[in-house]
Amino acid sequence: MIIEPRMRGFICLTAHPDGCEQNVKNQIEYIKSKGAINGAKKVLVIGASTGFGLASRISSAFGSYASTIGVFFEKPPSEGKTASPGWYNSAAFEKEAHKAGLYAKSINGDAFSDEVKKQTIDMIKADLGQIDLVIYSLASPVRLDPKTGVLHRSTLKPIGEKFTNKTVDFHSGKVSEISIEPAQGDDIENTVKVMGGEDWTMWMDALKAENLLADGATTVAYSYIGPSLTEAVYRKGTIGRAKDHLEATAFTITDSFADINGKAYVSVNKALVTQASSAIPVIPLYISLLYKIMKEEGIHEGCIEQIQRLYAERLFSGKEIATDEKGRIRIDDWEMRQDVQDKIAKLWQEATTENLAEIGDLEGYRKDFHNLFGFGFDGVDYKADANEMVAIESI
Ligand code: NAI
């Protein structure tokens, strides 16, 4: 079928299998071009199909020749209906990994459930024995608590008072003011339940109980801080409480790893266009200004560049891993540079519908957004018939 983008707000209803494959191949090429990293060899990535998790899986496999198991929650294709992009990404990843002689298997299901944890445990036991790196990169709006059966929904709300600021509809380029009502009732608790560290702990406990973590095993989860401009709705909002919880969880997991000399880290990453971040109000405007400045300064990175640097210069540099005063790895260091933030703060005041395309990188935002769904890649013939029924080799 001929597959075209069908946009609905901050999602796209279609995905292009060949474009997703091209995206994965480009990321693999980037990692190969940067040379080998002496990293972990048996890696589990939870949230492995898009964004930072996919970049982590690619970095481990093609940077360190690692065997990888990827867990994700994606929609498979049906006749005449495309899969979600993470499905096609994972199909392409496995194809390339297998071609390169690397072990790669995937599990498609709800990572919050006991069943998927059990399935993963069985796969590790049968195939890999023990794991030495677990990347935890889930971004989900809901979580069904496997113990209580309660479905928790996360929210993106300020805490205490209403938040009003500028935002942009990145499709039309219209800059407008948005107001978000503060969290009420159980909003904070629910968001912590979904995006906090409870499920990360459950994964680590389950793996450790079965003796599936190698001596010296490391686990890393991803967090975000960002500037004061977005603070009310992000870091000091409901999602920020969840990230506080996730960051505190790194310490409790490290404590529980004492007998295996293991360690849990949180890496604070840069703001990037992913399916998760495009859903957050205000962030698209911030990102389009951020991209503009970082590209001008020659310090722009996408997910793959971020994770390559995280691996090569932090986790597996052979030196002691540098952390901030709260024990976090900071790979958002270039985003948070004072000169970068000062320029964004100034542009933020000036931004209007009329000038954003010029003072911000709206074009770059849109391109990245299209790319998430496999659209807009050089080397892909979008007019040609594409086969939507792509299978993931291990599923
Ligand atoms: P994403 O939306 O690209 O990826 C989310 C992944 O989680 C996908 O592989 C998806 O299949 C998987 N997933 C979602 N629900 C699942 C479930 N119930 N069971 C199994 N898999 C499930 O998101 P992104 O942006 O890569 O986010 C990953 C982490 O990075 C999050 O913790 C996010 O807060 C963090 N982060 C994101 C930043 C950004 O700007 N995008 C910046 C810094 C941190």
Image: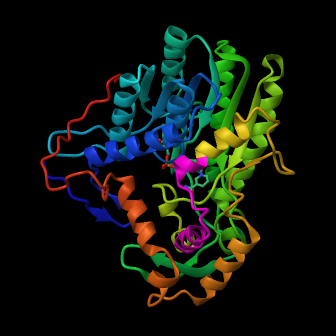
Where is residue 270? Give x, y as percent: 62, 57
- Taking the image as shown, residue 29 lies to the left or right of residue 302, namely left
- Could you tell me which residue is drawn at 48 percent across and 74 percent down? 361
Q: Is residue 47 visible?
A: no
Q: Quadrant of residue 318?
A: top right
**102 or 29, which lies in front?**
29
Q: Is residue 131 above or below residue 33?
A: above
- Taking the image as shown, residue 313 lies to the left or right of residue 140, namely right
**262 or 292, which lies in front?**
292
Q: Is residue 348 above or below residue 319?
A: below
Where is residue 201? Give x, y as percent: 69, 32
- Could you tell me which residue is drawn at 42 percent across and 60 percent down? 368
Question: Magenta region, mostly helix, strand or loop?
Answer: helix
Q: Is residue 282 above or below residue 119?
A: below
**314 or 160, which lies in front?**
314
Q: Is residue 305 magenta?
A: yes
Where is residue 37? Give x, y as percent: 62, 32
- Could you tell me which residue is drawn at 74 percent across and 38 percent down? 265
- Could you tell me which residue is drawn at 62 percent across and 52 percent down? 191
Q: What residue range appears in magenta?
A: 287-306
